[in-house]
């Protein structure tokens, strides 16, 4: 799954370094820029101060009701631009300012979500980068397992209940699966919980596994994929690193491309282009990596229709 928090941080820092900033208005060219970042979830509180920029972050820690208050703090800090990481954060920012430029990096249709008037000429003070929605990603990952395991009807989801994004992703998976496939959540808050969770999956007759993105699972990717193989569970992950560690399949966004395109939007706004006339960028592609060695380890023969969709294949 796409890590939008990483996109926001990377896009902002990249924008400050890009040559596009040479187009910046003279009024801004001789002072340190102030960038505000507003998001729903808090990976690590941090503030960046360099000679080029002062980047001030506000995270709601999963409490959407706090977003307007945090947005107001950024406006009071006199930032030049606010970068938002979700539709809710964008709406909170527009509720406190209709003049300060806002650039979103968020999933879903920004027109349907009421963020912009249209994609070509957004109007107002908002533009940004539209990514695949969590619901779209959930449906795509479910299709992967359905194509890999014909007739699959019981899918396990490994998730960390202490991670607020996981609850939203789990809900989208259940909505996308019903009524054809039953989705069963299995909790793991630490590496010590993994063995128990996989044993529970066997007891429940789970036939395939989706692993939601979480730092615990990323740190212990090798252990996760080894347990999936031990319990003979075809699994789909949200980052290429899992396929490289021996996992069967990974479906993910192209982080570098999103950072590059979001950085370009941020740089153009800082350079003086009005968000009202700057078309929303869209990125709809997800990349699929398949590990054929993992398939052989599971005794699987993947259909050619699935292999033909892969952007990358690991054979050994």
Image (cartoon, grey):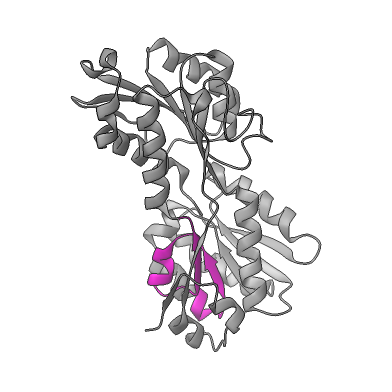
User: From the image, which quarter does the C terminus lie in?
Assistant: bottom left
Residue 159 as seen in the image, left or right of residue 53 = right
Whether residue 48 is visible here, answered yes or no, is: no
Along the viewing direction, whichever of 234 and 128 lies nearer the viewer: 128
Please give the name of the residue rendered at 28% of the width and 12% of the height, measured from the top-left corner: 27
Please give the name of the residue rendered at 40% of the width and 51% of the height, measured from the top-left corner: 257
Image quadrant assignment for residue 115: top right
Position of residue 81 measured from the top left corner of the image (x, y, whole percent): 40, 22
Please give the name of the residue rendered at 26% of the width and 15% of the height, measured from the top-left corner: 26
Position of residue 37 measured from the top left corner of the image (x, y, whole percent): 41, 28
Along the viewing direction, whichever of 147 and 200 lies nearer the viewer: 147
User: Does the stretch in magenta take in 249?
Assistant: yes
Position of residue 170 measured from the top left corner of the image (x, y, whole percent): 64, 52
Whether residue 218 is visible here, answered yes or no, is: yes
Q: Is residue 75 above or below residue 301?
A: above
| Image label count | 0
Image quadrant assignment for residue 302: bottom right
Please state the extent of the stretch shown in magenta in the rendering.
Answer: 228-253
Image quadrant assignment for residue 191: bottom left
User: Does the stretch in magenta take in 148?
Assistant: no
Q: Is residue 245 above or below residue 109?
A: below
The furthest residue to the left: 51
Please give the name of the residue rendered at 49% of the width and 19% of the height, measured from the top-left corner: 71
């Amino acid at each position: 799954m796409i890590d939008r928090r990483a996109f926001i941080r990377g896009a902002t820092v990249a924008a400050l370094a890009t040559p596009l900033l040479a187009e910046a208005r003279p009024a801004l060219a001789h002072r340190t820029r102030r960038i505000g970042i507003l998001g729903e979830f808090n990976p690590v509180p941090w503030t960046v101060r360099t000679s080029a920029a002062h980047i001030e972050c506000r995270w709601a820690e999963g409490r959407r009701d706090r977003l307007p208050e945090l947005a107001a703090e950024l406006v009071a800090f006199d930032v030049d631009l606010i970068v938002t990481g979700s539709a809710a954060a964008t709406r909170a920012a527009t509720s406190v300012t209709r003049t300060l430029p806002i650039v979103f990096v968020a999933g879903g249709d920004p027109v349907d979500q009421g963020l912009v008037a249209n994609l070509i000429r957004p109007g107002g003070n908002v533009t940004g980068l539209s990514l695949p929605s969590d619901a779209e990603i959930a449906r795509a990952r479910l299709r992967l397992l359905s194509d890999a395991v014909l007739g699959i009807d019981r899918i396990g989801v490994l998730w960390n209940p202490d991670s607020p994004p996981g609850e939203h992703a789990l809900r989208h998976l259940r909505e996308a699966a019903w009524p054809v496939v039953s989705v069963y959540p299995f909790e793991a808050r630490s590496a010590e919980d993994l063995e128990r969770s996989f044993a529970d999956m066997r007891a429940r007759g789970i036939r395939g596994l989706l692993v939601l993105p979480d730092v615990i699972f990323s740190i212990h990717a090798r252990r996760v994929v080894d347990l999936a193989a031990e319990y003979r569970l075809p699994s789909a992950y949200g980052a290429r690193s899992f396929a490289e560690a021996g996992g069967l399949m990974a479906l993910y966004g192209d982080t570098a491309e999103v950072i590059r395109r979001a950085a370009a939007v941020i740089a153009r706004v800082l350079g003086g282009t009005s968000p009202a006339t700057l078309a929303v960028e869209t990125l709809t592609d997800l990349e699929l990596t398949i590990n054929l060695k993992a398939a052989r380890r599971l005794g699987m023969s993947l259909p050619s229709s699935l292999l033909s969709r892969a952007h990358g294949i690991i054979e050994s």
